[in-house]
Amino acid sequence: MIEARGLCKRFGAIDAVREISFVAGDGRITGLLGPNGAGKSTCLRLIGGVLAPDRGEARIDGIDVGGEASAARARLGALPHAAGLYGHLTGRENIAYFGALHRIPAARIGREIDRWRERLGMADFLDRPAKSYSQGQRVKVALARALVHEPRNLVLDEPTNGLDVMAIRALRGVLAELRTEGRCILFSSHVMQEVSALCDRIVIIGGGRVLADDTPAALRVRSGTTTLEEAFLRILADGEREDEAPLGEGAA
Amino acid sequence: MRALWTVFRKELLENARDRRTLFSALVFGPLLGPLLFGVMVSRIVAEDAGSARQSVSLAVVHGERAPDLLAYLTAAGARLQRAPFGERAARSAVERGRAGVVLIVPRDYPRRFEHGEPARVLLVADSADNATRGDAARAGAMLQAYASAIAQLRLQVRGVDPLIAAPVTIDSIDVASASARAVSLIGLMTYFVLFAVLMGGLYFAIDATAGERERGSLEALLMVPIARGALVGGKILATSASMAASLAICLAAFLGVLHLLPLERLGMRSDFGPLMALEFFAICVPFVPVGAALMTFVASFTRSYREAQSYVAAVLLVPTLPIAFASIYSLRASPAWMVVPSLSQHLLMTSLLESRPIGALDLVVSAASSLLLALVLFVFTQRQWRRETMLG
Ligand SMILES: Nc1ncnc2c1ncn2[C@@H]1O[C@H](COP(=O)(O)OP(=O)(O)O)[C@@H](O)[C@H]1O
Ligand SMILES: [Mg+2]
């Protein structure tokens, strides 16, 4: 389970994340939906502990990321926005490196890699240097790398970026499987269809704050639209209006 | 500790597969110095051989009074010119640098020579003038040779074995100018050794920091539950390993190059043998983590590979500064200087090359101060890696 409680993060004059709170439950896929610059990556970085919040806290399975960083991180797998691999290492070596850093015994790492090789269909490229990979192959290896220590929680930052339809489909399949295993999955996207196809719950953020947090069906009902696309746009527009009012007063 | 080892092994494996890194760490870095050194020394040797063969230039006043002498000098390789001034003006001409070396044949020379009396010639030269000092000495030697040849002829004419007049013969080899150069060459050699040490780690340090960021692997790495100290330590250790390898290759290459070069002709004792190479290695090894930590530290602030390249390359200049300082002030090894890394290594290596004894205290202080600085740099680097700005 991943919890965000009143997370705030400023970069100089930019309020990237303002009071973001939500809960991503186990056995569920939670979508963090928002346009570019909404604060999705910042939010996921706060959860991953590579950024420290100015206020608020993130918890992973109830463990404070800021307090017990190691214990919290051990329970989290992450596919960051730039899921870069080491080009001179093979996919297998890339995954094994992270397994070793998580202090997983070598034999178990080998078994895990073999398992993910079959599950993600990596057999024909896993032992080639990663610099020759296509974007889809890179994401698969990066996903296996995030899962090698069998974390209960997984965060993915716009994982479908640059993937073709086939690869996106394969990824969705894997995420759905991980859900049935009871894991907590939190992923960000700026594409509504992507989120609606997969998520049990959608957290819409805009301008660094949560604008809506509900099931896809409830979101549709709430905004009185027939498609999620329209619901998304309406919620964003409402959010902007709310933002501008206090800002205008402040400037005056 | 295990994490540090994991990071260390991965960095080595990754860089071992990178041809550019490997080339710069194990070929270009360590061999550039010895090769350049070899080329420079052989050119100097060739130049010196050339200047030895170079003829002496002499301005002659009243050469017509001693035609035999002039013929002898010409045959011996002297280039003679008629001086454009007389006996009296010769001295001031040399003083003012209008003439190099002047040979004056006085009026009484022909008469005294004919009568078998000591016939005087005058050689005017400025011994403070580096450019003509060699000419003056060689001209003097030629005149001496002429005098003894004449003496032997006269003895022979009188039925005396001429060898009686030559109880001792002297062959001298002038190394004055060459050994002066040897001193600066020594500074060059120690610089090349320190340069090889740093080059050995250049791309390792860049790859481990700026490379990690540019590839986009940094964020995932920073989410792994290991101490930043282990991460940074493993990277610095891998960089150090490559630098130590580069140092070893460089010293082996110097062994080969110095073995081939005729260093005695430069007034340098070429006693740079395997033992001294090992001593060099021991002296320089404490400098290895200093360089590795410094380059990693500098690279940690850069945003891209290219930016890192230019900043970290600037670190390659670091060892030149103390060496330049040392040669300007003619520093010798002393405990006070041993607290300055790179300067201490330079001074210790120079002492070895000049066959001066090295104090045990100097060695200890040099190693300890270097390791201490490495530790300080490591702590700073680790602190930088704990910052959020690392993500870039
Ligand atoms: N390291 C940073 N330094 C300064 N500003 C940042 C940094 N990271 C993000 N921002 C700013 O914070 C805002 C939110 O960024 P981000 O979380 O990346 O949005 P998203 O992932 O939703 O596109 C943007 O305005 C972005 O420019
Ligand atoms: Mg983003």
Image (spheres, coloured by chain):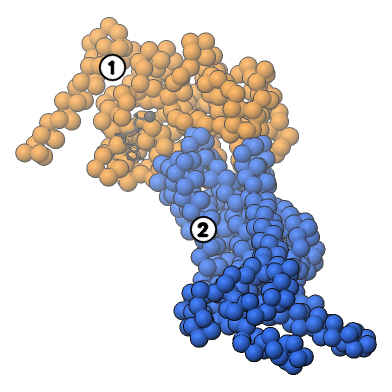
Q: Amino acid at mark 1?
A: Phe
Q: Which residue occupies 66% across, 25% down?
A: A128
Cα distance in 3D space between marks 1 and 2: 57 Å
The chain letter of the orange chain reads: A
Task: Answer above or below: position of A25 versus B242.
Answer: above
Task: Answer above or below: position of B12 versus A210.
Answer: below
Query: Circle 2 sits on which residue?
Result: B317
Residue that protrudes farthest toward the bottom in the picture: B117
Q: In this rendering, would B47 be left or right of A31?
A: right
**Residue in front for this viewpoint, B386 or B92:** B92
Task: Answer above or below: position of B287 versus B109.
Answer: above
**Of discs 1 and 2, which sits in the foreground?**
2
Marking on residue A68: none
The picture places residue B297, in percent across and down from the top left corner, at 49, 54
Residue at disc 2, secondary structure:
loop
Q: Which subunit holds the residue at mark 1?
A: A
The chain letter of the blue chain reads: B
Badge 1 crowding class, 10 Å Cα cut-off, few under 14, some 14 to 19, many 20 or more, is many
Q: Which residue occupies 19% across, 26% down?
A: A240
**Residue in front for this viewpoint, A8 or B303:** B303
Query: Circle 1 sits on which residue?
Result: A232
Asked if labels 2 and 1 touch by Cβ distance under 8 angstroms, the answer is no
Q: Is residue B282 at all visible to an observer of this figure? A: no
The picture places residue B125, in percent across and down from the top left corner, at 57, 81
Q: In this rendering, would A6 be left or right of A234?
A: right
Image quadrant assignment for residue A7:
top left
Q: Which residue occupies 67% across, 67% down?
A: B55
Residue at disc 1, secondary structure:
helix
Q: Which residue occupies 24% across, 20% down?
A: A235
